[in-house]
Amino acid sequence: MLKDKMILDMTVHGYAKKTIRSYTMCMYILVRYFQKSPLDLEPFDIYTFFLNMRQANKSDSTLVIFYSAFLFFYNLLGRKDMLELVPFPKRKRTVVAVFSQTEVTAFLTNCSSVCEKTIFTLLYSSGIRIGEVLNLQVKDIDFERKAIFISSGKGGHSRYAILADKTASLLKQYMEIYNPKTYLFFSQKGKNIPISPRTVQAAFQKIRNLSGIQKYATVHTLRHSFATHLLEDGYSLVYIQKLLGHADIKSTLIYLHVSPNSLLKITSPLEKIGNIRLGIFENQNQYGFQFR
């Protein structure tokens, strides 16, 4: 079966489970759109499909996912020509939302429970993704080394994240009250089931409103804020890249665009040159050249 073959090949290539689900869903949508097997389609059909998505104002990110899914599928069949009429969708460079440190303080102050405060403090203080927080287990917290082990990061990569002292204190308080067994943050359905992303997102929006923060933001904004504040404090992009778990530093470079203040703090090389006499010239001829 084509679907099974595609899933097996993506698994062998080390694709994340989320990516596998996304790609198979893209193929399902393609089949449903044309009401026939993808084997019976022609390059112009794929062109028509993308034209329809453009006319429906689908985002560039969505188009990239569909393009990548179709490319993977048709490469398996030796049909690279199927996408020859469609240019690779380029993502427009966007500026991500970032909380100021004052807004972070207001947000964390308005958390209504120890659970909420612990989750969102952990997200901001470590910069880890929401999916990584949901998958955290009790054994992943190393209080002695002040580290958080991320066993299933994006792309299947593992790494360590920062465990701040204030976060560690909150975590200890949280663990005393809630007594987690396997998953650190568990569902109301049971301690062996992780809390759902929808529950965390809903709590985030509730707290954002209570804090009077008007700008558009999601849970991921806390990760953006973590990286931006580190950059503004003078930390190297390479260190930030490793903490965020970015495989390519290009993903980290976005924070140069959201943090112009860090660029303005750079000292001009002129300031390092001593003994330069700067004065006002009263006679135009002193310049050595004239403006006409």
Image: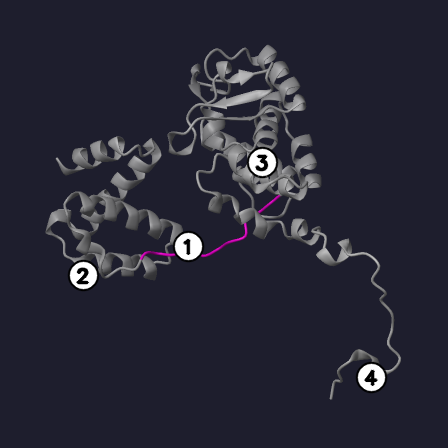
Question: Which mark, residue 44?
Answer: 2
| Viewer-nearest residue: 131 or 73 | 73
Instruction: Characterize the local packing of mark 3: few (<14), some (14-19) or many (20 or more) Cα atoms within 10 angstroms.
Output: some
Which SS class for mark 3?
helix
Q: Can see residue 205? A: no
Residue 232 placement (x, y as % from top left): 66, 44
- N-terminal of the pair, mark 1 or mark 2, is 2
The quarter of the displayed image where residue 57 is located: bottom left
Q: Which of marks 2 and 3 is nearer the N terminus?
A: 2
Q: Which mark is residue 285?
A: 4
Q: Is the magenta stretch mostly helix, strand or loop?
A: loop
Q: The residue under label 4 is which amino acid type?
A: Asn
Visible in this render: residue 183? yes
Q: Depth check: 139 or 251 in front?
A: 251
Mark 1 vs 2: CB contact within 8 A: no
Boundaries of the magenta span: 88-98
